[in-house]
Image (cartoon, coloured by chain):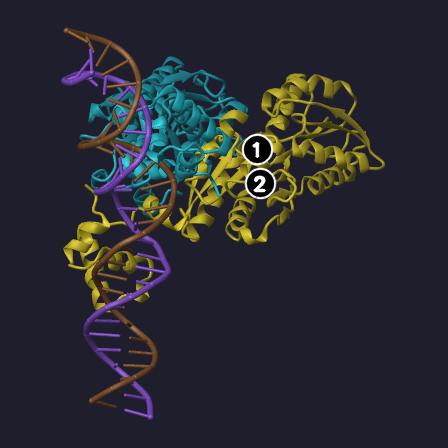
Chain colours: A cyan, B yellow, C brown, D purple
Amino acid sequence: MAATIKDVARACGVHVSTVSRTFSAPHLVNPATRSRVLAAADDLGYRPNRAARALTTGRTYNMGLIVADISNPFFPPLIKAAQAQARGRDYHVFVADTDEDPRVEEELIRTLTKQVDGVLLCSPRLSNKMIERLAEDVPFVVVNRRIKGMPAVLMNVAQGAKLALDHLAGLGHRRIALVSGPIGSWTSNEMQGVAAEATGLDLVFFGPNQPTETGGLAVAPEVAACGATAVLAYNDLVALGLVEGLSAMEIGVPDQISVIGFDDILPGRLNRPKLTTVAMPAVQAGRMAVDLLLQSGGEGATVTLDTALIVRESTGRAQT
Amino acid sequence: MAATIKDVARACGVHVSTVSRTFSAPHLVNPATRSRVLAAADDLGYRPNRAARALTTGRTYNMGLIVADISNPFFPPLIKAAQAQARGRDYHVFVADTDEDPRVEEELIRTLTKQVDGVLLCSPRLSNKMIERLAEDVPFVVVNRRIKGMPAVLMNVAQGAKLALDHLAGLGHRRIALVSGPIGSWTSNEMQGVAAEATGLDLVFFGPNQPTETGGLAVAPEVAACGATAVLAYNDLVALGLVEGLSAMEIGVPDQISVIGFDDILPGRLNRPKLTTVAMPAVQAGRMAVDLLLQSGGEGATVTLDTALIVRESTGRAQT
DNA sequence: AAGGTTCTTGCAACCGGTTGCCAAGGAGTC
DNA sequence: GACTCCTTGGCAACCGGTTGCAAGAACCTT
């Protein structure tokens, strides 16, 4: 069906190697011949088979991007940025979703291994040990996780958390609830780290929680009962769940309790009150991850990107 | 680096073809030999190279899934469903985003062509003619678009629109605004079709509009001025924009104007008032698209999936 | 025990390209 | 006009598997 290199060679009476070189090393073939080949190729609708090429060259010009959950609005901007960046480097990005299941994640990586030149692992659910083992077969760049000797793109959650706490403190809040996410998640750990260093604040810790709206909804009553006047939530989904749960209890946000999330996702911007949040540099992260992978010479280079506080309507002065 | 079929063959003193058969046609090899091969393979960490295999078999066990915009909350559930369904059939799905750009879309398809057994095209931006041409090189299943002779998964927008209009009529609404999306979009056309058939209702048409929250926000004043007591919006994002715009004008939803969207995306569920909407069967669509592609024998089979009205808080009795 | 089956395995060509090596031919030099 | 040097393009091996064919071994039949 589709034209192969042989068809082109036959069509213009040259050897296949000449056709091959026309595409992969044009300077080695006579301009006249080259244009003849190109014309024939165009005529037959020939396009080099990347998979076949990869077999000999070892480079697929593809990369994999594995995320735990595409539905999480945090990921799409990162994915788009990575794809755009890769396209500019003549690479293609294949995205796959693991459904938060480590087994699926492993299987996916194994399948991808031979079909890509590297894999971008976003918020992986696998153990460090497993990741290190898989890294023997294919280069990785890890996003949102620190693994010894492996290139990583990190978001400065600690700094963002600090911004958020300072903002709340400036509004007069003293007793603040910290609603974390799943056990062992990078963000949760970072948040706790900051909490440990915070002085002059009275922090109450809740967790672990599901990293979704449901998680926030479920923990709302406890948060309301603890006497905090502000909440710092694991992410925007949790924050939105909290707002909803608190409203259901007739507790106004921000009048009675202030709420801050992380990520800056779309629903947070649409919600009322509009959510105050710590914006994650997802777009930059996507770009950086691609760059790190391609310049892989950098070995275990780690990039940490700063976050930014976006003040909207869900935070206000502490009630006195 | 990674073990190949040859390494395994050498390790247990058989020919490569025997190793190959151990994996692709186990019944043709002696059980004793087979277990020896499997042991050696396991020992060396051997995994068949899918790309190389595809070269001779012509089957990659991969499929492509192309969407216009991953950020649109409508797509992720569809994507997840497709991936899950494919996984069950021992297939993998590579997702790519075109950024709404037809040129990127074409390029992506061309690249994918040789690396997948088929492509799922969701809400494509390419012309029918171009799609038909590309279909010569790789099987397609189109989602949300009808193209002669090509397998398609459609959502019954007309039926959903009818449900919505009936719901509104039942609440006493007579004058209803129809806020459409981009020109030529499948959903917009279907909506208009239903509108043309609606009797006893006074429909006011607004469009084309951007299919986003901004589009809804922008058209809100006109809608408010036209005297309608209810609005049927192109999708949930537009509906959310409308709600926001109307609120800004001190027009209450649903007290003064009822609003219905399409899609049933997450932000609509989180918003207050919670959005009444026509739910699209995105999960089923993802599954069906995969099935259609795999049983491609079905040629131009077209599946139409029903939609469902989800009544929440943004619709109420018409004010009298 | 001869002849016929069925199993098992090796051989070699092939999938669609890439690339090192080499020879032919043209241009340039003296 | 003979001798380099460079350009050009063919040859063939190779990437990692698959598969039709055939030969040898083991098993069955009568």
Front residue of D21/A136: it is D21
Residue farthest toward the right in the current orientation of the protein: B200
Q: Is label 2 on the same chain as label 1? A: yes
Whether residue A257 is visible, yes or no, is yes
Residues B169 and A120: in front is: A120
Where is residue A197? Give x, y as percent.
Answer: 24, 22
Residue B182 image position (x, y, % from top left): 65, 25
- The disc placed on residue B142 is 2
Q: Look at the image and tell me whether residue A279 can be seen.
A: no
Q: Chain of mark 2?
A: B
Q: Residues within 10 Å of mark 1 (few under 14, many from 20)?
A: many
For numbered disc 2, what is the local secondary structure? strand
- Quadrant containing the N terminus of chain B is top left
Q: List x then y, in percent, for residue A201.
A: 30, 20
B154 with respect to A314 (left or right)? right
Q: Compared to D20, does A223 lie above or below?
A: above
Q: Which mark is residue A91?
A: none
- Which residue lies at the image location 24% right of the left edge and 63% below the top edge? B34
The numbered dot on residue B124 is 1
Instruction: Tell which circle, 2 or 1, labels the residue nearer the N-terminal end.
Output: 1
Pinpoint the chain carrying mark 1.
B
Dot 1 amino acid type: Pro
